[in-house]
Image (cartoon, rainbow, N blue to C red):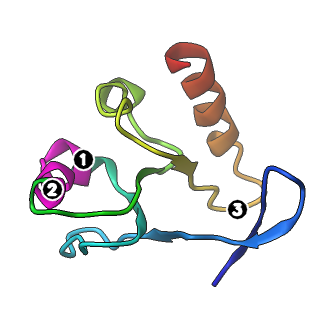
Amino acid sequence: MPRVIDTHGLLADDPWSRHPEGAPIPATGDLLLSPSAWIDGSVAAARAAGRRGRDGLWLEPDADLDAVAAILPPVALVAVHFPSAFDGRGFSIAAALRQRLG
């Protein structure tokens, strides 16, 4: 399991898993789901079928923020993909999310 730095500055297990695009959404677990899974109703259908666990949003650095804005209210976590250390688009989308959407 990957490790992250928690809110206390300590190393902790990362409970979030990236959900593969197009795969069935499991009934449990903390998942990072693509915008399309939210927009096409897959997340809502999994919830209606009894899914438990937190649902997060995985964004690529070229994501359309206007399309994403409508799905943010129920999202527990937003994760932005940084393809490389030299690709600043992840920082740009994170800043835009903070400025435009709170």
Residue at x-position 25% and y-position 75%: 26
| Magenta stretch bounds | 37-47
Dot 2: element? helix
Circle 1: residue type? Trp
Disc 2 target residue: 42
Side of 44 where 92 appears, left or right:
right
Q: CA distance from mark 2 to mark 3?
A: 29 Å
Figure quadrant of the C terminus: top right
Circle 2: residue type? Ser
The label nearer to you, 1 versus 3, is 1
| Badge number at residue 84 | 3
Residue at x-position 34% and y-position 55%: 34
Where in the figure is residue 44, as x and y percent of width and height?
A: 16, 49
The overriding secondary structure of the stretch rendered in magenta is: helix
Disc 1 target residue: 38
**Within the image, what quadrant is residue 85 found in?**
bottom right
90 up-or-down from 27: above or below: above
Residue extending farthest to the right is 9
Dot 3: element? loop
Q: Is residue 54 shown in magenta? A: no
